[in-house]
């Protein structure tokens, strides 16, 4: 069982309250429904078309990078090799590359190999539509149709509502969870994913990638955010 977050659409995109939800001190009434599970996703993740789509997503903003150009020179062959590794379960993520970033604070950053980032996008391509419908309505990070601008518009709506159209003082809490991206419990995360995803191959692949992140975390590096980790954290929220 899980809470059907469609009730969050009571606070809908037009910023109007409907009869299914209330806000600011009045209880929302979620509807409990049976959770649907998905079993036959492995071949979708490993398909050539999905891996090709994942390549173009991983390439976005980096098309001139040498490692991208190298992969693209033999694109079809490289995708077929990656597909075979996934299907034969011989795929293993490479150790993360670590470098120093000064912006201006000096930090040690670890990032995934480009080939591994393609796999991350391939997983997210298939799993994101399944999980997105159960996310809280007012979650805006790394979601289609959401983003920073929509979040600001939503904040402005709540600000105007709480301040009675800017005529009264109101309070805003600005908060952040320290090291949130580094401290998510991967065991709990996998249990959450497995409530819907029943395919052992998919779960094993996600665990294999998460284990690679855990190994790097023990070396006290920060991680460059990537598609799979950002998707994982949306689920964990």
Image (spheres, grey):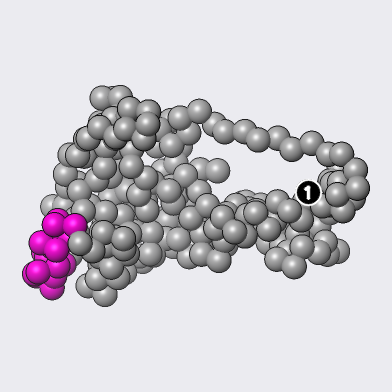
Write the residue at 70% across / 56% down. Answer: 154
Res 92 seen here:
yes
- Residue hosting label 1: 159
Whether 73 is among the magenta residues is: yes
Q: Is residue 43 above or below residue 219?
A: below
Q: Which residues are magenta?
A: 65-82
Q: At 48% across and 33% down in the image, what residue appears?
A: 180
To which quarter of the image does residue 127 belong? bottom left
Helix, strand or loop at label 1? It is helix
Image x and y of residue 226, in percent: 35, 49
Crowding around mark 1 (Cα neighbors within 10 Å: few <14, some 14 to 19, many 20+) is some
**Residue 132: x %, y % from top left:** 53, 60
Front position in the image: 217 or 33:
217
Q: Quadrant of residue 171?
A: top right
Instruction: Verify whether residue 30 appears in magenta.
Output: no
Q: Predominant secondary structure in magenta?
A: helix
């Amino acid at each position: 069982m899980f809470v059907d977050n469609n009730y969050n659409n009571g606070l809908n995109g037009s910023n109007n309250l409907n009869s299914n939800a209330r806000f600011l001190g009045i209880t929302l009434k979620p509807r409990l429904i049976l959770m649907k599970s998905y079993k036959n996703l492995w071949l979708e993740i490993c398909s050539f078309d999905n891996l090709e789509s994942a390549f173009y997503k991983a390439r976005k903003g980096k098309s001139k990078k040498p490692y991208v150009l190298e992969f693209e020179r033999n694109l079809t062959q490289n995708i077929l090799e990656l597909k075979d590794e996934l299907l034969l379960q011989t795929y293993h993520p490479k150790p993360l590359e670590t470098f120093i970033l000064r912006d201006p604070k000096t930090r040690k950053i670890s990032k995934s190999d480009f080939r591994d980032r393609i796999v991350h996008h391939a997983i997210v391509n298939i799993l994101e539509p399944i999980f997105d419908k159960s996310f809280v309505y007012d979650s805006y990070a790394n979601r289609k149709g959401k983003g920073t601008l929509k979040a600001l518009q939503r904040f402005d709506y709540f600000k105007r509502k709480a301040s009675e159209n800017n005529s009264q003082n109101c309070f805003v809490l600005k908060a952040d969870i320290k090291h949130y991206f580094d401290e998510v419990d991967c065991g709990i995360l996998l249990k959450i994913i497995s409530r819907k995803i029943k395919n052992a191959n998919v779960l094993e692949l996600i665990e294999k990638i998460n284990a690679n992140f855990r190994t790097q975390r023990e070396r006290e590096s920060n991680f460059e955010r990537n598609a799979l980790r950002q998707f994982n954290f949306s689920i964990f929220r």
